[in-house]
Amino acid sequence: MYWTDNKGRWQQDVLPFQGLTAARPTKSKVYVMVLSGDRKGLVFQVSKVTKADGTVLLATTPKPQKELVANVCLVEDHLEIGCTCSRLP
């Protein structure tokens, strides 16, 4: 897993799943990982964020599913946001 430290530098290491905390997505078309429930550990694209009821709509098939924002962790693909490192084999 990759993440940025407090100085904005990319770090790589293995993080335990229990170490992840909820992170509210602020827009659609980003990816989140579900932290508990039937979809625990799965990554989905967000179709819609609803601040009023604190939910996100996950792009699932055959129809989108609602999930509480307190139950998702925002994830990013560092290679899509300008990182110059290469993919690991």
Image (cartoon, helix red, strand yellow):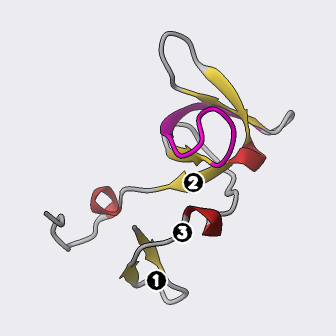
Farthest bottom residue?
7
Q: In this view, does 22 lie to the left or right of 30?
A: right
Q: Which of marks 3 and 1 is in front?
A: 3
Q: Nearer the viewer, mark 1 or mark 2?
A: 2
Asked where in the image residue 81 lies, by quadrant, the reply is bottom left
Residue 64 against residue 70 in the figure, above or below = above
Which badge, 2 or 3, is on the more N-terminal residue?
3
At label 1, the amino acid type is: Gly
Residue 68 pos. (x, y %): 76, 38
Q: Specify the segment rendered in magenta.
A: 35-50
Disc 1 residue crowd, few under 14, some 14–19, many 20+, Cα 10 Å:
few
Task: Describe the element under mark 2 as helix, strand or loop.
Answer: strand
Tell me, for residue 74, which label it has, or none: 2
Q: Residue 89 carries which label?
A: none
Image mark for residue 16: 3
Q: Quadrant of the C terminus?
A: bottom left
Position in image of residue 6 (x %, y %)? 55, 87
User: Helix, strand or loop at disc 3?
Assistant: loop
Residue type indicated by callout 2 = Leu
> How many numbered marks are there?
3
CA separation, marks 3 and 1? 21 Å
Instruction: Tell me which numbered mark, 1 or 2, is placed earlier along the sequence.
Output: 1
Give left or right: position of 65 versus 51. left
Disc 1 + disc 2, Cβ < 8 Å: no
Disc 3 residue crowd, few under 14, some 14–19, many 20+, Cα 10 Å:
few
Q: Is residue 61 above or below residue 53?
A: above
Cα distance in 3D space between marks 1 and 2: 17 Å
Viewer-side label of 2, 3: 3
Q: Quadrant of the N terminus?
A: bottom left
Where's residue 45, x and y in %?
49, 36
Residue 24 falls inside the magenta stretch: no
Residue that badge 1 annotates: 8
